[in-house]
Amino acid sequence: MSYKFTFRPIARKFLQPLVTSYGNWEKREAIIISLTDEQGRVGWGEIAPISWFGSETLEQALDFCHQLPQTITQEIILAIPDELSACQFGFESALAKLQTEETFISHTLTYSGLLTAGEGVLNQWRGLWKQGYRTFKWKIGVGAIATELDIFHSLMHSLPPTAKLRLDANGGLSCEQTKTWLETCDNHPDKIEFIEQPLPVEQFSQMLVLNECYTTAIALDESVATLKQLTEVYHQGWRGIFVIKPAIIGSPSRLRNFCQQYKIDAVFSSVLETEIGRQAALQLAVELSAPNRAVGFGINHFFVAE
């Protein structure tokens, strides 16, 4: 079967720049695609790369879309190379929309709310708590560690006993800083769920060792950005938590096969995609995420209302 293919680039502004250890992020750019079958049904997909996280660049994704004919087949979609992991997700998701009527049941999921870096977190969590969030993710590794530890201690005193906190360093810590954070978090075992990607990808072996030395768990994120990386670190011995970003990891069907085969402890997370990519990612989360893990899709408060 063949499908009429169209695409258009989009950009959405953040309410304020999103601060990470990689720098400031001011707008989210992506590509919305559509596949129309011979009966006139339309399947929508989203290509939302994050090149500094491990996917292709937006320019590479656009070049790929420009090179495709106006009519494409399933064979073309399934032959998209691994180097275009966000494209794999976008096209396969659009195809899946045409091939199945199934939709996920949202009430089976709980959500983690993303918090800004810095001391603004001390007020921001309260608004999200009122919206029903009970798990939060806070960006660290952005400012001086002494300052962030002071904020952390204040946060621990103010968060309700039933709240859970994830700390996300985006690979921005040194080994010694990671040990300091792990030691600190070990004093709050009931509130800290894990520290996400404390060290850079190339320091996987150190994270493997550190994960065995402390009560606080380490979760891999950038280290498992693509299916190739996910497979490699699993076979290198990682049996801890995997943060899966479906929109950039690659083929949804291959991700499903991997998770079903190896029964990994997976936390599914957003890449700040639109509702189109979000729905496709959450469908996978319903099927594959660990039942005790909130999904990291509490991100809408970061965007300017449209």
Image (cartoon, rainbow, N blue to C red):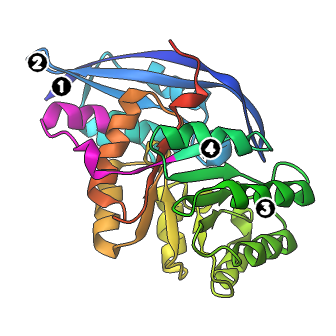
In front of the other: 17 or 132: 132
Q: Above or below — where is 234 with respect to 123? A: below
Q: Measure how far apart labels 1 and 2 are at the Cα level.
A: 7 Å
What residue is rendered at 61% in x and 76% in y?
A: 189
Quadrant in which residue 154 is drawn: bottom right
**Tag 2: amino acid:** Glu
**Tag 3: amino acid:** His
Task: Name the N-terminal-most of marks 1 and 2.
Answer: 1
Residue on which disc 4 sits: 125
What residue is rendered at 77% in x and 78% in y?
A: 183
Q: Measure how far apart labels 4 and 2 are at the Cα level.
A: 48 Å
**Tag 4: amino acid:** Trp
**Tag 1: amino acid:** Ser
Q: Above or below — where is 28 with respect to 168? A: above
Nearest to viewer (mark 1 / mark 2): 2
Q: Secondary structure at mark 2?
A: loop
Q: Measure how far apart labels 3 and 2 are at the Cα level.
A: 59 Å
Task: Name the N-terminal-most of marks 1 and 3.
Answer: 1
Q: Is the residue marked by circle 1 packed among few (<14), some (14-19), or many (20+) residues within 10 Å?
A: some
- The answer to whether mark 1 and mark 2 are in CB contact below 8 A is yes
Residue on which disc 1 sits: 2
Residue on which disc 2 sits: 38
Task: Name the N-terminal-most of marks 4 and 2.
Answer: 2
Nearest to viewer (mark 1 / mark 3): 3
Q: Which residues are magenta?
A: 92-112
- The answer to whether mark 3 and mark 2 are in CB contact below 8 A is no
Q: Is the residue marked by circle 2 packed among few (<14), some (14-19), or many (20+) residues within 10 Å?
A: few
Q: Which residue appears farthest toward the left when viewing the image?
A: 39
Residue on which disc 3 sits: 153
Q: Above or below — where is 258 with respect to 71? A: below
